Image: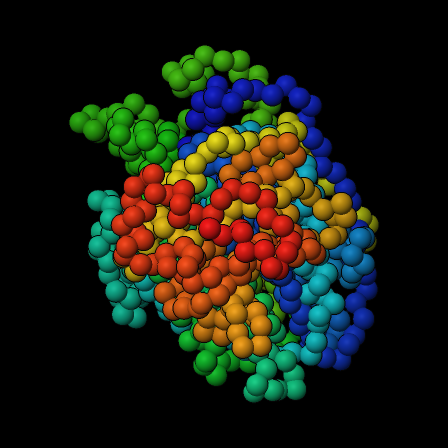
Amino acid sequence: MKRYSLIFMPIFVLMFGICGCMSVKIKGSLPPPATPVASNEFRVGAAKTDITPMPGYPMAGFAAAGRLSRGVWTRLYARAIYFEDMQGRSMALVSCDLWSIPGGLADRVAELVATEYGIPQLGREQIVISATHTHNGPGNYCTSALYNLMASSQQGFDMDLFDFLSHRVAGAVAQAWQSRKSAALIRSETRLAGIGRNRSLGAFLQNGQSAQDFLQENQNANIPACVTLFPTGGDIACQAIDPTLTVIRAEPRPSDPTAEPIAVMAFYAVHPTVMGSSTEVYSSDVFGVAKTILEQELGSSVVAVFNGAEGDVSADWERRDRPATLKVGKLLADGIRNLLQQPGQDVTGQIRFGFTWCRLDDVAKPMVGASLLAGSEADWSFLRDAGWREGLVENDPARQVPGHGTKMDPLSTELVHAWVPLNLSALLENIAKLPKRTGIGVYGLGQATIATLPGEFTTMLGRQIADSIAAAAGNNERVLFIGLANEYVSYFTTEPEHDAQHYEGASMLYGPGSGQRIEQSLVDLGANLGQAPLRAIPQKYSYDAGAKKKFGVKQFNLLLHTERLRDTYSSLANVLMDEALGIPAPYHPFLVFIDTNPKWPDDPRSSDRVTPSVSIEEKTATGFQPLQIAGIGETDEGLNFVTTVIASFAGKSRWNTIWMAPASVDSNALKVFVSHGLHSHFLGRATDNTVWIHYKSQELRKKADTDDEIPTLVPSIQEYTIDIDNNAGFR
């Protein structure tokens, strides 16, 4: 997560105010799992649910630099894969397009799966819920008041969003369970370069000989060096990462060469955050691009990408825009696709699991480093221009700057008053709500071993933990990580990396001993995998989520009714970049329509979307049919649509859908459907004399360069009637 730190919180508080509202308590109980029932076959099920919220939520991950969402570029999903062995033992792995999974959300999902969705054999210990770590998803759903204060640009906990996410994720698990069928698992592995680079190379190299051995291993494997954009990087930055890509595919049994996999699980460690802090639409970023491409190709398959020890690994982007995101995402999709075409290794055996609550607050007093304020080497804050840097150099008089590399108490009165004077009691209240424990687990899926990481672990710490687990479990197979799982407790580094006080080391809440505590707990679980008894009694959970607040279209309404469509393009410049040219391309065709304000489903178990969906149809000899490009339907399930709110007024929202149509589109008649929930509305038809068809012409581009020509080239703002013969929607 790109954050400005605990000690930067006073600025947040000053900007947005301290809410004196009563904190929201998230409580419940976790029933023990039911006794498994043997099925005499290995079964797998997979499903995905749309977790895209309404616009108006602060986006999490970039802290104060993050924007409010205006709409959607790529939809956010929860993807669940359910496993059940011949003895009936089961587990579920879930990947969510979110920046983190708070502990309270993981607990609530487990409770809902057992009690409301009727799957009592799945206990809390058997469900792994992870985040991809996109920074363009919503914030303010955390069950820690601290992260609801500092993870996004506004403070507060939104109960509606929390309930929405909880039910959608639980629903994905339930649908995966319902779809289970006899299956076989196949594992493939490769090294994939070009995706990421180490953003804290200086700290990485502090690991001494182990770091050198790691680099040599990658060099021997022909992982190419790179020249990073950042002066503190270096040409070996792309070799100072774990480039291992592991894919496990579930194929239906009996074997059918024509059938697509039930599910594809990819394990890869990288910050999948190419889109920058200026992005104003929801996006699943790099992982979302890869998953969308593969799911469109595979048809019915569910493709989940699980992040790993990515704490010091940034995506290898050149710019922070849509073309760069597509480039990196396509590289990842290519790597996964290539592995799917390989024979692979059969994964056979039983499901085993070990789970524990790991205490952290007794390791050390929570402290952070002042160099955290500088940001990471790959994504620094504005304070870098004021002299703030990473690294422990305070003993070098020639390079001393205020706070440079210093470790300090987050409540340091001296530092706080250096920034702003305020009442510290409110800060004390939020600091006290730091996550003090985290659920961690080790899972055996046949001979594959999977371990969860409750935050962002650096490359070298991940390697260290993996080796320790493998040794304890007596398994020669590479240990697979699912990072950002079941709780978020910031960064974890090795001790030398912590002492170097780069961004990651400065971000550690409980010091280097906390990484060792997590490692030892995972090793203990690995050594006794599958031997831990099931709980005999329910376990209560309780979280303090902080002050309650509502977000959404009604609350943010930052865009005036009179906002010009031209301004919409300007605000989305990094999304509307021309993929081939790498320059702004503001003349994509678009449609404006009016709908009631989005709202949460009346039934929390509903699968209805809360934002409109858009699709394109073309006229054929047999009538209008869904537009197909390379055999794939052109809808906002793909990568070519951006739908945003222009304004909200009188209980209605004015929406703008921009279609970044591929160059291959060549049709004389198109029409657009917008659906909301279960209702589809025909909104208009484009013919060959409209902007929808001729927007690519140089003449039109030239004319559109002048503002006074724009209104004649775009649709009028009006509410469209549901009349298939009405062609007035496009002018």
Q: Residue at x 79, y 74 (%)?
A: 38
Query: Would residue 642 be visible to someone looking at this image?
Result: no
Query: Would residue 427 be visible to someone looking at this image?
Result: yes
Image vertical order of residue 195 relative to residue 585, above or below: below
Q: Residue at x 71, y 63 (%)?
A: 175
Q: What kind of colouring is applied to the model shown?
A: rainbow
**What percent of the width, then of the height, locates residue 270?**
41, 55
**What percent of the width, then of the height, locates residue 701?**
30, 52
Q: Is residue 396 left or right of residue 714?
A: left
Q: Is residue 285 left or right of residue 145?
A: left
Q: Residue at x 49, y 13 (%)?
A: 422
Image vertical order of residue 514 relative to residue 36, above or below: above
Taking the view exactly as shown, the residue that stands out farthest to the left is 398
| Depth order, front residue of 520/731 | 731
Give the quarter of the figure containing the N terminus. top left
Q: Residue at x 54, y 35 (%)?
A: 647
Q: Place residue 691 in its image quadrant.
A: bottom left
Q: Is residue 314 left or right of residue 542?
A: left
| Depth order, front residue of 490/261 | 261
Image vertical order of residue 68 relative to residue 523, above or below: above
**What percent of the width, then of the height, locates residue 561?**
52, 32
| Depth order, front residue of 283/434 | 283
Q: Place residue 377 in its image quadrant.
A: top left
